[in-house]
Image (spheres, rainbow, N blue to C red):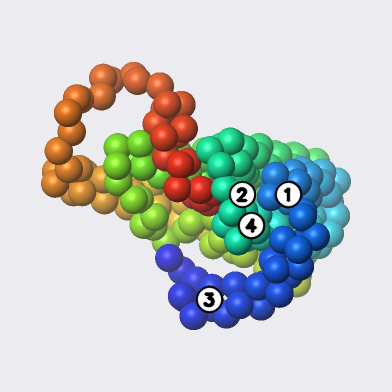
Amino acid sequence: MLIPAFLRQGFEALLQPLVSRLVASDVQPNAITSVGTALLVAAGVFFGFGWVRVGAALLLASGVCDMLDGRVARQAGSSSDFGAFYDSTLDRVGESALLIGVAVFFVRGGVAEPWMVPAVVLTAIALSAGLIVSYARARAEGLGLDCKVGIAQRAERVLGLGVPTVLFGAGPGGLLLLSVVGLLAVVSAVTVVQRIHYVRKASGSVRRKTRPRWGDSAEPLLASSTRKGRSGD
């Protein structure tokens, strides 16, 4: 992971009073998840219309919601299979909407004509790789493996896209946003490879009663992986 553990722990400590207040107010974790997704979808819309700083601010706010929902669920003792499924599914919806908005920004002239096609391709790679990162963890957990490895988990992706653009917008000619999306595509693809490598090594030490068939659906595995409560990717 690119974010040091002490920074994560420090931010979690800052959020704890808010978590306690939300629990005391009986705010439901699924409601927090829904708000976070709505913020991500709105961020995608603002990115698409060229309001990059506003979109980035909404993206960072959605990241806070993403940290809150699971902590509220655990502290309130309300973790559930459906809550974990709902959280994971809406994360993917929001992330897709966000990067579609970024692609629309590029298509609508956010970058110069020679950069348009590369920008859209890099955005598609970033979106696809991000979804595969999450799928890889769900599939691995369905096999009984805890697969949290990788340099670009969800928090890194949110901060990596949100912080530079909230400070500087898209940059001259949109090239800052293009560079960030390109970097996001690379680190997400590297994370996919890291998780494949990890599962390849770890699965050799795990005995299984039955072998999964090629083409088995991931949905049953995803459902089984959520019993531990909400998880990111």
Q: Kindly state the secondary structure of the residue where label 1 is placed.
A: loop
Residue matched to label 2: 78
Q: Quick check: 191 above or below 57?
A: above
Q: Cβ–Cβ below 8 Å for labels 1 and 2?
A: yes
Residue matched to label 1: 28
Residue matched to label 3: 9
Residue 113 occupies which quadrant of the picture? top right
Distance CA(mark 3)–CA(mark 4): 20 Å
Residue 216 occupies which quadrant of the picture? top left
Identity, as a three-letter code, of the amino acid under mark 1: Gln
Distance CA(mark 2)–CA(mark 3): 23 Å
User: Can the viewer see residue 12?
Assistant: yes
Residue at (20%, 25%) from the top-left corner?
211
Identity, as a three-letter code, of the amino acid under mark 2: Ser
Q: Nearer the viewer, mark 3 or mark 1?
A: 1
Residue 133 falls left or right of residue 120: left
Identity, as a three-letter code, of the amino acid under mark 4: Ala
Q: Residues within 10 Å of mark 2 (few under 14, many from 20)?
A: few
Distance CA(mark 1)–CA(mark 2): 9 Å
Q: Between disc 1 and disc 2, whose residue precedes?
A: 1
Report the front residue among 75 and 18: 75
